[in-house]
Image: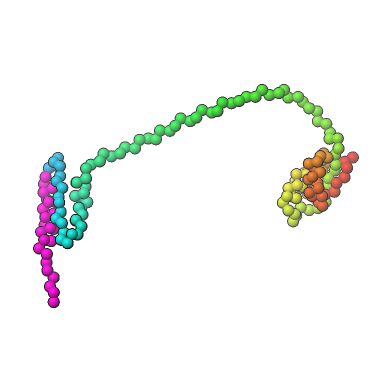
Amino acid sequence: MAEKKKEPGKAEKKAKPAAEKAEKKAAPKTAAPEKAKPAAKEGGKEKAKPTKAEAAEAAPEKPKKVKKPKQRKAPLPPPPVRVRAKAPVVAREKRPPEKTIKVTQIGSPIGRQAYQRATLKGLGLNKMHRSRVLEDTPAVRGMIDSVAHLLRVEPAA
């Protein structure tokens, strides 16, 4: 059977870093710490990583960053206000429309498409058997035509 051979270098390597640590602690802190060169492992393996304490001692102290308060930009001035000269308001007398028609709702909007319900509201009709006297204009005539099956149209007296 093959016996495992102890490598003589490993015991020495472990003792060496412990001795270096003791030297570093004994050395005055004002002097720059010397960097320890760990002995390369046999077989070309990676170097041993330094411990946290060693890394903290070896790293130079960085000054702490002080956060500066954010400077807010001054708000923009409001845009200049343009003032138009208004024409004098002339009081108009309301004249009754020349031609009027009487529209009565005779059909229910239940189950109808949304645009038909909206047209009835636009004509001012929202319940059955209600009547409105409207001005006879092309706009009103167009609305009446779109929901003619729900309305009764009569000339106003």
How was the colour assigned to the protein in this rendering? rainbow
Q: The C terminus is located in which quarter?
A: top right
Of 50 and 43, which appears nearest the observer? Answer: 43
Q: Position of residue 139 (x, y in %)?
A: 78, 41
Of 84 and 2, which appears nearest the observer? Answer: 2
At a point 73% along the width and 48% down the height, the residue shown is: 118
Residue projecting furthest to the right: 157
Tell me: residue 21, above or below residue 140.
below
Q: Tell me where residue 14 sits by quadrant.
A: bottom left
Residue projecting furthest to the front: 44
Tell me: residue 42, above or below residue 21.
below
Residue 105 in view: no
Q: Position of residue 127 (x, y in %)?
A: 78, 49
At a point 13% along the width and 41% down the height, the residue shown is: 31
At a point 13% along the width and 61% down the height, the residue shown is: 10
Q: Is residue 37 magenta?
A: no
Of 148 and 10, which appears nearest the observer? Answer: 10
- Is residue 151 rendered to the left or right of residue 86? right
Q: Tell me the chief SS of the magenta region.
A: helix
Q: Position of residue 140 (x, y in %)?
A: 80, 42
At a point 74% along the width and 56% down the height, the residue shown is: 111
- Is residue 85 rendered to the left or right of residue 123? left
- Is residue 9 rendered to the left or right of residue 83? left
Magenta stretch bounds: 1-27
Q: The N terminus is located in which quarter?
A: bottom left
Q: Position of residue 7 (x, y in %)?
A: 11, 64
